[in-house]
Image (tube, rainbow, N blue to C red):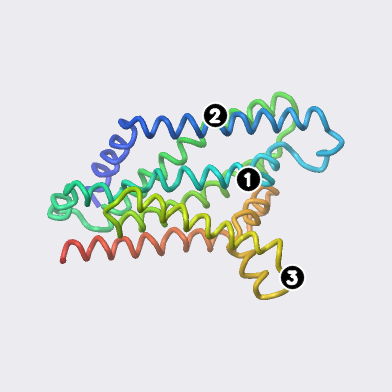
Amino acid sequence: MKAFFPIYKRELFAFFVTPLAWALILVFLLVQGGHFYLLVLNFSRMPEVVADQSPAQAFFGDTAILYLLLFILIPTMTMRSFAEERRSGTIEPLMTAPVSSGAVVLAKYAAVLTTYVAMWLPTLFYLVILGRTGQIDWNIALSSYLGVFCVGAGYSAVGILISAVTKSQLVAMALTALVILGFFIIGIGDFMTSEGSFLHAACSHLSIWSHMNDFSNGIIDSRRLVFYGTLAVLPLFVTTRVVEAWRWG
């Protein structure tokens, strides 16, 4: 694992030297900033309507903005991980270097996850603003950020895997977006199926909307953690086997 940090630093550098990275961060912060502003404005104008919910709960739970951002950001962040290296031919020197396949995969994944976390860090200022105007339930805030991290970690691993099985960044981006959209569509069944049925239980287990509602209410369900842990570990394991196959192919 000695080669982990050099590859990790190279991936971060390669991402942040491109205009695309800064454009993604700008779009993310503009959308989240506008969302937060409208949310606070709504709470200040109609306090009696939203009295049973805090701004933090509404920001992370009852909103489609988070899912829209995931649908745009995750595929764009992960699409170049392996696809660009295979297209440009730079993957061959990496495969012949004394570097384990696991280190390569984990370094690329860690770089994507670090970027994802960095995008969310400025939103902590929203909590500072809310803290100056009222009380904040820090348990809800922390569990909400845990949910955001878990979702990003799981979907990023899926994106890394898809990037490893194609040479086209556009194809990798499109397929990752379709997988995320598929999870979201399946999750909608949580609200359309009969409660207590097997289909309802399956949809609820896959529903990011249901998951984030729990996290935004301060509920940390171990089933959610196991789900996203599996969603992260399994694709990374398969990606490592794919990279290992290139080495011996």
User: x%, y% of residue 126?
Assistant: 62, 30
Q: Secondary structure at mark 1?
A: loop
Residue where numbered disc 1 is placed? 64
* Number of numbered discs: 3
Label 2 neighbour load within 10 Å: few <14, some 14-19, many 20+: few
In the shown orientation, is residue 181 left or right of residue 101? right
Residue 194 shows which numbered tag? 3
The quadrant in which the C terminus is found is bottom left
Which of marks 2 and 1 precedes in the sequence? Answer: 2
Residue at 69% in and 30% down: 38
Q: What type is the residue that disc 2 sits on?
A: Leu
Q: Secondary structure at mark 3?
A: loop
Asked whether residue 52 is in view, the answer is yes
Estimate the spatial distance between the alpha carbons at disc 1 and disc 2, rounded to whole Å. 16 Å
Q: Are marks 1 and 2 in contact (CB under 8 Å)?
A: no
- Residue 202 picture quarter: bottom right
Q: What type is the residue that disc 3 sits on?
A: Ser
User: x%, y% of residue 30?
Assistant: 54, 29
Q: Is residue 16 above or below residue 234?
A: above
Which of marks 3 and 1 precedes in the sequence? Answer: 1
Residue at 51% in and 59% down: 228
Q: Is residue 11 above or below residue 193?
A: above
Q: Is residue 63 above or below residue 219?
A: above
Residue where numbered disc 2 is placed? 30
User: x%, y% of residue 211?
Assistant: 62, 56
